[in-house]
Image (tube, helix red, strand yellow):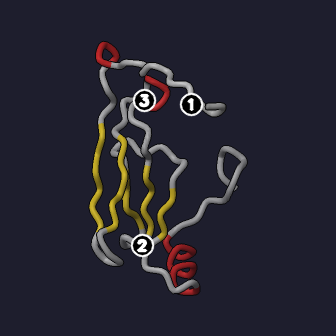
Amino acid sequence: MSPRGAGWLFGAKVTNEFVHTNGLKLICRAHQLVHEGYKYMFDDKLVTIWSAPNYCYRCGNIAAVIEFKDATTREAKLFKAVPDQERVVPDRNTTPYFL
């Protein structure tokens, strides 16, 4: 079990077995902070993606998304947080449901 008490820890052996059994080439996962935005592991069969820059306004991490161009071609796109002085809360537009 993981240190948080939720989920399970696993490694290359389990990843390779899961990919083989399920006919996959890659497992994409999230919900674990990666300071570089994304990280490939286990012979590039697993990638962890984190899409919230400067998580909780204090982690200083980069965010990422991965664009899949086709089944074998993909590109990571990285994003930094907007500096505090440039952050703007957009005006709230109410949807006219009853018009």
Q: Secondary structure at mark 1?
A: loop
Classed neighbour count for the residue bearing mark 1: other residues with Cα under 10 Å, few (<14), some (14–19), many (≥20): few
In the image: residue 55, left or right of residue 85: right
The quadrant of the picture occupied by the N terminus is bottom right
Q: Three-letter amino acid code at disc 2?
A: Lys
| Number of marks in the rendered image | 3
Q: Three-letter amino acid code at disc 3?
A: Cys
Residue at the (42%, 21%) spot, across then down: 90
Please give the residue where the numbered disc 1 appears in the rendered image: 95
Classed neighbour count for the residue bearing mark 3: other residues with Cα under 10 Å, few (<14), some (14–19), many (≥20): few
Judged by depth in the image, the label closer to the viewer, 1 or 2, is 1
Please give the residue where the numbered disc 2 appears in the rendered image: 45
Give the spatial CA distance, label 1 vs label 2.
Answer: 44 Å
The quadrant of the picture occupied by the C terminus is top right
Tell me which label, 1 or 2, sits earlier in the chain.
2
Camera-nearest residue between 20 and 76:
76
Give the spatial CA distance, label 1 vs label 3.
Answer: 35 Å
Camera-nearest residue between 84 and 57:
84
Residue 40 x %, y %: 37, 62
Q: Three-letter amino acid code at disc 1?
A: Thr
Judged by depth in the image, the label closer to the viewer, 1 or 3, is 1
Answer above or below: position of 69 versus 99.
Answer: below
Residue at the (57%, 78%) spot, across then down: 18
Camera-nearest residue between 32 and 1:
32
Q: Quadrant of residue 48?
A: bottom left
Q: Quadrant of residue 59?
A: top left
Answer above or below: position of 73 versus 83.
Answer: below
Please give the residue where the numbered disc 3 appears in the rendered image: 59
Q: Secondary structure at mark 2?
A: loop
